[in-house]
């Protein structure tokens, strides 16, 4: 039975699918030995699951940290009120707390400032969503588990391996569900990619190349000026940004990582690279403002990127400008107290000698993870919206190109739909008290987090490190 037949039997191919005319000539010549041989492509029709969770009654949740991520997960309750209800909120920022109180009609007595206050009360909900900053995951998570709550926990789980392992032990001790927000596992694109690899369509998996292009302005926003600029106050960028990628690699390979070696540094955003005469802030009349790609005026005021951090009523350039005068987001990128790497490379060996290489790069025009998967009988290449499977023997090509954002339920759901699909599975798991309904349990998430800690150990210690 050839592989195409094998895929059809698995129902992964549309029977009688039409050619979709992949531009073979657009491939680089060293990838494509014979354009005529690799001709056309059939559509891979892997169903995308809806976002609703059918449960007998809505699960109740408390949002701890009503910022960007807390709001995202709470948003599931707006779309699917029969599945989830927000019954409590904690945030030290009164505006954010109040906004959530109003939006979800949270009773006044269930609104708290600091997260400690939540756990001074007897348990009053099924679950807690922890979406506080990286260094404030451990304590609320330990407290929530001890109180008997199930937890939806933002990544990274915690800033140290020891704390990660303590959370795992606590979840086991109290027999609670902890779902880690490794949202990419829930994105239809990655689900389809994994199904194809698992189907045997490309033979035995041998190696993977995976790249995370951060995008130059996103790097400046989050990891130079913003919340994650300091690896000691939060987590090193391999966890803060790329724990998703290590997790996806571990998931696709399906075998434990045994060895990791990493390199990387902060190459560019350093004081010695500051152009002459650059003042403290871009708004202080910087002579380089008109040409610097990292100009805060250009990124926030003109392009209006990442402005949600300012909590403004509207994207008004005047209001944005005022924020640049006082917040870290107006600072010159060469004068910030940042230490996160702006390029990072890791190589990994998994069970059965499967290898993977990962690169994280700040200096790219756009984001969107790129992945190449090499098997003994075929190859997959994808960019987080589309992937193409090529069979060596037959030259057949199959393309997955579902426009997830065009499916009404998925519209506006971040991370390729993964953000809300994660909440759907969390709701199901809590309602059924069955963590096997989740892909990113605490157990598997700790494994990929350990890969991140070991990568950092390798980078700093300049040696290969065993992953145990
Ligand atoms: N899964 C993903 O893809 C993804 C993406 C982005 C961020 N994150 C992670 O999500 C977490 C939150 O990130 P964010 O972008 O929403 O940050 P954010 O700053 O927008 O939100 C964090 C909120 O926590 C609140 N907070 C701080 N201290 C608190 C305390 N003691 N008690 C209660 N509330 C407190 C802050 O006021 C803020 O509103 C971080 O750990 C981040 O790394 C995950």
Image (cartoon, grey):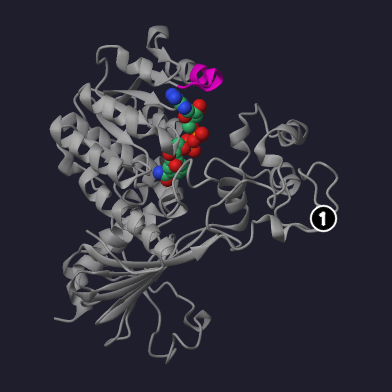
Corner quadrant of residue 160: top left
Instruction: Answer few, some or many: residues within 10 Å of disc 1's Cα (few below 14, many 20 plus, some between 14 and 19).
Output: some
Q: Position of residue 254 (x, y in %)?
A: 21, 62
Q: Residue at x 86, y 53 (%)?
A: 287
Give the vertical position of 220 relative to 301 (above or below). below
Q: Is residue 113 magenta?
A: no
Q: Nearer the viewer, residue 47 or 312?
A: 312
Label 1 sits on residue? 288
Residue 415 seen: yes
Element marked by disc 1: loop
Question: Residue most toward the top?
Answer: 109
The chief SS type of the magenta part is helix
Horizontal relation, residue 179 to residue 114: left or right? left
Q: Count the marks: how many?
A: 1
Q: Position of residue 331 (x, y in %)?
A: 71, 43
Residue 68 seen: no
């Amino acid at each position: 039975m050839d592989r195409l037949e094998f895929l059809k039997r698995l129902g992964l191919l549309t029977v009688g699918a039409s050619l979709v005319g992949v531009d073979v000539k657009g491939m680089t010549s060293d990838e494509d030995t014979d354009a005529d041989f690799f001709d056309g492509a059939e559509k891979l029709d892997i169903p995308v699951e809806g976002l609703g969770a059918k449960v007998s009654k809505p699960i109740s949740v408390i949002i701890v940290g009503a910022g960007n991520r807390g709001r995202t997960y709470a948003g599931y309750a707006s779309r699917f009120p029969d599945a989830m209800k927000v019954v409590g909120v904690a945030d030290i920022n009164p505006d954010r707390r109040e906004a959530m109180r109003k939006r979800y009609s949270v009773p006044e007595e269930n609104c708290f400032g600091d997260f400690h206050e939540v756990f001074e009360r007897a348990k009053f909900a099924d679950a807690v969503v922890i979406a506080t900053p990286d260094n404030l995951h451990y304590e609320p998570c330990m407290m929530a588990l001890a109180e008997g709550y199930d937890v939806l926990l933002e990544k990274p789980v915690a800033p140290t391996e020891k704390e990660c392992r303590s959370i795992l032990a606590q979840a086991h001790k109290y027999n609670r569900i902890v779902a880690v927000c490794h949202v990419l596992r829930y994105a239809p694109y990655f689900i389809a990619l994994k199904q194809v690899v698992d189907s045997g369509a490309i033979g035995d998996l041998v190696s993977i190349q995976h790249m995370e292009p951060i995008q130059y302005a996103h790097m400046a926003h989050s990891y130079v000026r913003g919340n994650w600029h300091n690896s000691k106050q939060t987590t090193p960028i391999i966890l803060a940004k790329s724990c998703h990628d290590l997790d996806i690699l571990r998931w696709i390979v399906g075998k434990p990582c045994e060895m990791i070696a990493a390199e990387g540094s902060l190459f560019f955003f350093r004081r010695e690279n500051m152009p002459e005469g650059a003042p403290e802030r871009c708004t202080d009349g910087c002579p380089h403002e008109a040409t610097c790609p990292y100009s805060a005026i250009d990124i926030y005021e003109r392009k209006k990127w990442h402005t949600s951090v300012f909590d403004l009523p509207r994207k008004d350039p005047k209001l944005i400008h005022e924020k640049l005068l006082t917040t870290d987001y107006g600072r010159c990128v060469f004068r910030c107290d940042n230490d996160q790497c702006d390029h990072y490379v890791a190589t990994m060996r998994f069970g059965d000698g499967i290898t993977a290489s990962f690169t994280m790069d700040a200096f790219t025009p756009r984001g969107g993870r790129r992945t190449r998967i090499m098997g003994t009988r075929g190859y997959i290449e994808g960019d987080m919206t589309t992937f193409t499977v090529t069979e060596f023997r037959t030259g057949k090509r199959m393309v997955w190109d579902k426009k997830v954002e065009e499916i009404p339920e998925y519209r506006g759901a971040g991370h390729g739909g993964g953000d809300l699909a994660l909440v759907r599975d969390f709701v199901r798991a809590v309602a059924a008290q069955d963590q096997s309904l989740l892909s990113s349990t605490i157990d598997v998430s700790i494994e990929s987090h350990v890969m991140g800690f070991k990568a950092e150990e390798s980078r700093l210690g300049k040696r290969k490190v065993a992953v145990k």
